[in-house]
Image (cartoon, helix red, strand yellow):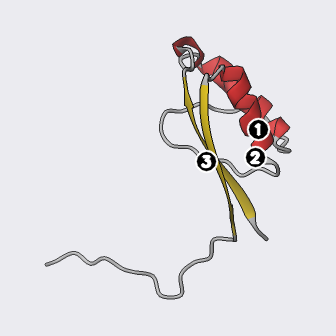
């Protein structure tokens, strides 16, 4: 199984579109539906890095770009395989 990751840098988004948690929650719900996800409830908007896995992530990203009104967009998409645990993980040890 492979996954597609899409990344975007958006510029020129009006500030008021980024400061309304209720509107951002609705935007994420719309994007998730466009990507093929069917969330059981409204999205929670928190500050900090977030991630999402979707069936068709580009469709979700398209909704975000359009609804935020970005004037400049730079995107990248990459296919990745499943993330498996390392057979020999690197361990960090504290000095005594």
Query: Number of labelled discs?
Result: 3
Q: Nearer the viewer, residue 31 or 10?
A: 10
- The picture quadrant where one finds residue 72 is top right
Q: Which mark is residue 74?
A: none
Q: Secondary structure at mark 3?
A: loop
Q: Residue at x 63, y 71 (%)?
A: 83
Report whether 6 appears left or right of 32.
Answer: left
* C-alpha distance separating marks 1 and 3: 13 Å
- Nearest-to-viewer mark from 1 and 3: 1
Q: Nearer the viewer, residue 82 or 96?
A: 82
Q: Residue at x 75, y 34 (%)?
A: 62
Q: Percent x, y for residue 90? A: 39, 80
Res. 5 in view: yes
Q: Earlier in the sequence, mark 1 or mark 3?
A: 3
The vertical placement of 12 against 85, above or below, is above
Query: In the image as oriented, which residue stretches furthest toward the top?
Result: 16
- In this figure, which residue is indicated by the disc labeled 2? 57
- In this figure, which residue is indicated by the disc labeled 1? 60
> Is label 1 in contact with label 3 (beta carbons under 8 Å)?
no
Q: Percent x, y for residue 1? A: 79, 71
- In this figure, which residue is indicated by the disc labeled 3? 51
Q: Secondary structure at mark 2?
A: helix
> Is label 1 in contact with label 2 (beta carbons under 8 Å)?
yes
* C-alpha distance separating marks 1 and 2: 5 Å
Q: Percent x, y for residue 14? A: 56, 14
């Amino acid at each position: 199984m492979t996954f597609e990751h899409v990344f975007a840098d958006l510029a020129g988004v009006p500030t008021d579109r980024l400061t309304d948690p209720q509107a951002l929650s609705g935007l994420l719900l719309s994007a998730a539906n466009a990507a093929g996800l069917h969330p059981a409830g409204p999205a929670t908007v928190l500050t900090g890095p977030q991630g999402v896995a979707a069936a068709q992530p580009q469709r979700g990203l398209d909704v975000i770009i359009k609804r935020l009104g970005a004037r400049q967009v730079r995107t990248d998409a990459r296919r990745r395989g499943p993330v498996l645990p390392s057979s020999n993980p690197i361990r960090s040890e504290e000095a005594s």
